[in-house]
């Protein structure tokens, strides 16, 4: 159980990317005061928590309703996470999170807490896929379900803290420092994504 929770925590933390979110958050809230920034950060994390919790509860029934096996979703989820890992390693704008027109629209918004901060930056496709992979088989044991939820909220708390201290962190790290950390975590995510695909193929076609 501890290994499952640790693996989920690491994957979910890397997918949400609190460090790479910092320069985006600073840029999109350049017009706001520090108090307004923190209000938007709290609202974004709250909305993301609601979205992710709904997916964690409805994920398994949704897959069963659509007759999608968890192994099939492991393969797709692994490929999606692998694409995210490549974007992180090469420090490219994340097309798996948001498109260029959406980014242009977000620059004109005064309040970016719901869009694009909560969705798709925090609770984006990669995060939702990770949630469905973790909860997709159904968690019969209450302790496991509570543990996964706790890990999810811990990552969201880390994300909130990162946005709270975004300005001083950017002064210390700069864009280059943030990209270096992003590349290192991208390598880890890529390896985990490949493991998801292998597990899905093994489950679908047998060992």
Image (cartoon, grey):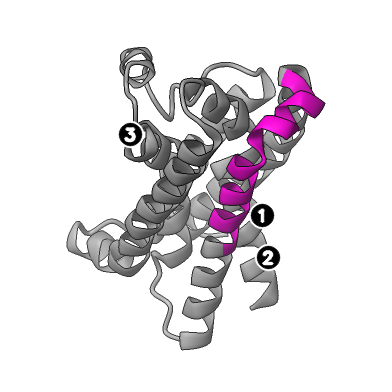
Q: Could you say which is closer to the camera, residue 157 or residue 204?
A: 157
Q: Quadrant of the C terminus?
A: bottom right
- Nearer to me, 56 or 203: 56
Q: Mark 1 falls on what kind of element?
A: helix
Instruction: Indicate the secondary structure of the residue bearing disc 3.
Output: helix
Please identify the dominant SS of the magenta region: helix
Residue underneath mark 2: 6
Mark 3 surroundings within 10 Å by alpha-carbon count, few (fewer than 14), some (14 through 19), many (20 or more)? some
Look at the picture and state if 159 lies above or below 117: below
Asked whether the viewer can see residue 129, the reply is no
Rendering coords of residue 40 (x, y %): 43, 41
Residue 183, picture quadrant:
top right
On screen, residue 90 versus residue 79, left or right, reads right
Categorize mark 1 by other alpha carbons within 10 Å: few (<14), some (14-19), many (20+): some
Placement of 40 over or under 184, stated as above or below:
below
Q: CA distance from mark 2 to mark 3?
A: 30 Å
Say few, some or many: other residues with alpha carbon within 10 Å of mark 2 (under 14 / 14 to 19 / 20 or more).
Answer: some
- Between 93 and 154, the residue placed more toward the observer is 154
x 49%, y 59%: residue: 203
Q: Secondary structure at mark 2?
A: helix
In this figure, which residue is indicated by the disc labeled 1? Answer: 10
Verify CB contact (< 8 Å) between mark 2 and mark 3: no
In percent of width and height, residue 93 lies at: 52, 17
Which residue is more in the foreground, 70 or 112? 112
Start and end of the magenta stretch? 154-174
The answer, for residue 185, to whether it is visible in the render is yes
Which residue shows up at 73% across the image and 33% down it? 168
In this figure, which residue is indicated by the disc labeled 3? 115
Q: Is residue 163 magenta?
A: yes
Residue at image coords 33%, 54%: 51
Mark 2 and mark 1 in contact? Answer it, CB < 8 Å.
Answer: yes
Please identify the residue farthest to the left as the structure is shown.
65
């Amino acid at each position: 159980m501890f290994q499952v929770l640790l693996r989920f925590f690491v994957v979910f933390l890397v997918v949400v990317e609190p460090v790479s979110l910092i320069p985006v958050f600073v840029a999109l809230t350049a017009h706001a005061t520090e108090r307004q920034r923190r209000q938007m950060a709290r609202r974004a994390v709250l909305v993301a928590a609601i979205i992710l919790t709904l997916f964690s509860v409805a994920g398994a029934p949704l897959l069963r309703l659509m007759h999608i096996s968890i192994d099939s979703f492991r393969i797709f989820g692994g490929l999606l996470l692998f694409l995210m890992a490549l974007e992180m390693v090469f420090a490219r704008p994340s097309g798996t999170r948001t498109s260029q027109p959406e980014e242009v629209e977000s620059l004109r918004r005064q309040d970016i807490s719901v869009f694009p901060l909560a969705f798709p930056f925090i609770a984006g496709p990669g995060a939702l896929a990770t949630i469905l992979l973790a909860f997709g088989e159904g968690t019969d044991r209450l302790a496991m379900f509570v543990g996964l939820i706790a890990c999810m909220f811990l990552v969201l708390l880390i994300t909130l803290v990162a946005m709270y201290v975004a300005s001083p962190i950017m002064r210390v790290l700069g864009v280059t420092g943030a990209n270096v950390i992003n590349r290192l975590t991208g390598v880890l995510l890529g390896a985990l994504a490949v493991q998801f695909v292998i597990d899905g193929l093994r489950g679908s076609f047998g060992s």
